[in-house]
Image (cartoon, helix red, strand yellow):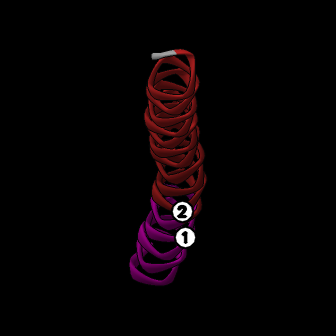
Amino acid sequence: MTGQLGFLWAVAAVVWFGILFYVVSLIRRQNRMTKELLSVERSLKDITEAQEDGQS
């Protein structure tokens, strides 16, 4: 019985660590995507400003 209980705790720990790893990876991916979107936004703003300056 004690061995089964230990196995159950081990499985529960693996599941919780897996969930934690997944959530952390989602947060990191979201941060990376936010940085990339800000970079694209800055690039588009620079291109738009350059075109407006060229037309003036």
Name the residue tied to disc 1.
Answer: 43
Q: Which of these two is toward me, 29 or 46?
A: 29
Locate the N terminus and report the quarter of the image it occupies.
Answer: top left
User: Which residue range is magenta in the image?
Assistant: 40-56
Residue at x-position 44% and y-position 68%: 44
Q: CA distance from mark 1 to mark 2?
A: 11 Å
Does the magenta stretch mainly form a helix, a strand or a loop? helix
Answer above or below: position of 19 versus 51: above
The residue type indicated by label 2 comes to: Glu
Per the image, label 2 sits on a secondary structure element best described as helix
Per the image, label 1 sits on a secondary structure element best described as helix
Residue at x-position 58% and y-position 24%: 6
The spot of residue 7 in percent (x, y) is 51, 33
Residue at x-position 43% and y-position 35%: 15
Name the residue tied to disc 2.
Answer: 36
The residue type indicated by label 1 comes to: Ser
Q: Are marks 1 and 2 in contact (CB under 8 Å)?
A: no
The spot of residue 23 in percent (x, y) is 47, 34
| Mark 1 vs 2, N-terminal side | 2
Q: Quadrant of residue 50?
A: bottom right
Locate the C terminus and report the quarter of the image it occupies.
Answer: bottom left
User: Magenta stretch: residue 30 in it?
Assistant: no
Q: Is residue 24 left or right of residue 15?
A: right
The spot of residue 18 in percent (x, y) is 49, 43
User: Magenta stretch: residue 41 in it?
Assistant: yes
